[in-house]
Amino acid sequence: MRQLVGTSEVSAWLLNPSTGLRTRLRTPHTVLVIDDDRNLTRLIEYNLTEEGYVVHVAHDGQEGWRTFFDLRPDLVILDIRMPQMDGWETCKRIREVSEVPIIMLTARANEQDIVRGLDMGADDYLTKPFQVGELLARVRAALRRAALPSVSEPDLSYTDDHLVIDLGNRRVLVQGEPIQLTATEFGLLAVMVKHADQVLSPRQLLEQVWGWEYMDDVHYVRVFVSRLRQKIEPDPKSPRYILTERGTGYRFVTGNR
């Protein structure tokens, strides 16, 4: 039996008659592909299906938005230039209601568009043309980040009069109110809290949060630090918790300055 890639919940057991051993079968992740290029969506659908994912396709932003609500997929692959509703607006609407990982897949390759996509809430940005193997690797990485972390350090937390971070329960409160963080945002915050008061370089953060495949994507760290500041800082323009150490990296500061 071929092993499914990117799977999560246990659904059944398979008995191997030759060994008498049981193997767990897992339900595959569901991926929604939103792109108006039908040849490309067929290619993506074929390769993801071969890897064991359940794939649904929409060919414009409005159809994708409706399908997202009906399907509630585990991951979205999203083009930018589409009829009816473009990828920017689709990404924005999805992010307003869900923390699902979003990979933007588009021919718009300049850094300004990449940063804009990440600022809109995308977790990753891959430009066309692309290698299928790279897309599959990024899908696996995004789903890996989205998986709930094992609670190996249940007592690790941070609390003050403004901010509560409870890593064991995956919970963040600002002024007593819970805030929504995407899996990538939470992963970045968790790494910084675990190394509180230590300076971490962008490459260290990339390796620990995104994985070695992203070691050259330094701008990802800058964008996601900015997103975290918008969500947890009393004044994002004058950060109290996540400080920039010029030319070195970032540091999560405990205690009031």
Image (spheres, rainbow, N blue to C red):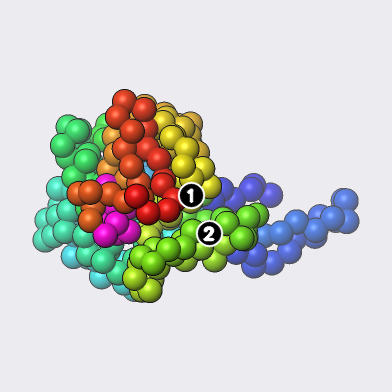
> Looking at the magenta stretch, what is its main secondary structure?
helix
Residue indicated by mark 2: 157
Residue indicated by mark 1: 193
Residue at the spot x=88%, y=56% of the render? 20
Residue 145 in the image, given as x and y percentages of width and height: 48, 50
Residue 155 in the image, given as x and y percentages of width and height: 61, 60
Report helix, strand or loop for mark 1: helix
Q: Which span of residues is magenta-colored?
A: 226-234
Vertical position of residue 41 compared to residue 114: above or below: below
Q: Is residue 184 visible?
A: no
| Nearer to us in this view, 189 or 42 | 189
Q: CA distance from mark 1 to mark 2?
A: 8 Å
* Drawn side of residue 82 relative to residue 74, left or right: left
Residue at the spot x=40%, y=40% of the render? 251
| Nearer to us in this view, 120 or 70 | 120
Residue 102 in the image, given as x and y percentages of width and height: 33, 53
Residue at the spot x=26%, y=34% of the render? 128
Q: Amino acid at mark 2?
A: Ser
Residue 148 in the image, given as x and y percentages of width and height: 54, 59
Vertical position of residue 64 compared to residue 52: above or below: below
Report helix, strand or loop for mark 2: strand
